Amino acid sequence: MDSTTIEQDLLQWPGELGDEFAQIHLWEAFRLAGILHSRCLADHHQDQTTPPRVNISTEILRMKVFASIQAIIGIGTFNFRLSLARAILYPLFIAGILAENAQEQQLTRVAFQYIMQKGQEGTEQIIMDIVAKVWKNGKGGNEASKLMIATEATAELNAEIHLY
């Protein structure tokens, strides 16, 4: 994720076909979350050799991640594919910790609540608690500081969370 070309590589990646339409939304959510994640790491390292980022705002990327997650939930795929519900944790976590306003925070909460209604309560509740801690302690911080708060909150819990 901290490659100097990762953002450009992900922007150019056309995606993959899947067995069902929901997988296309999932790939898109992962692709865009990967860009957001790489920006968090780039802000943290501040490497002067990094090429300038393409001019897509973080807000647009976040909203596209939320739109993809909302599309997956709206399709109703979770009723049949619990593994798909778990697969959206990575993009939901990344977009969630970077949520900038009440609307984005509400989108994050609703998605987590939907996943938890499907019987996936343990890990998902811990992840939602970490995201909420970032919202509380990361106000006004940059992308890297929000990722650092999430990392520290996870360490405080002595937890290792796999986000696919």
Image (cartoon, grey):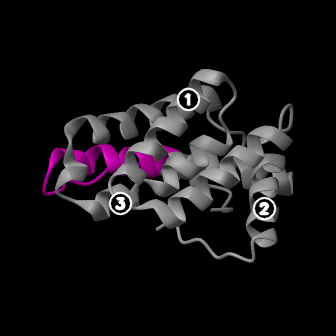
Q: Quadrant of residue 83?
A: bottom left
Q: Earlier in the sequence, mark 2 or mark 1?
A: 1
Is residue 22 one of those drawn in magenta?
A: yes
The correct choice, above or below, for 103 with respect to 119 in the image is above
Instruction: Check disc 2: other Cα within 10 Å, few if <14, some if 14-19, many if 20+.
Output: some
Circle on res. 146: none
In terms of depth relative to the viewer, which is nearer, 127 or 95? 127
Residue in view at x 34 percent, y 49 percent: 26
Residue in view at x 20 percent, y 51 percent: 79
Q: Give the secondary structure at mark 2.
A: helix
Q: Earlier in the sequence, mark 1 or mark 3?
A: 1
Which residues fall within the magenta stretch?
A: 11-32
Image position of 132 (left or right of 78): right
Query: Is residue 110 something that shows in the picture?
Result: yes
The residue that mark 3 highlights is: 119
The correct choice, above or below, for 68 with respect to 152 in the image is above
- Work out how far the residue at label 1 is from the one at label 3, CA to CA, in angstroms: 20 Å
Image position of 136 (left or right of 128): right
Circle on res. 153: 2
Is residue 121 one of those drawn in magenta?
A: no
Residue in view at x 67 percent, y 39 percent: 98
* Disc 3 residue type (three-letter): Gly
* Disc 1 residue type (three-letter): Gln
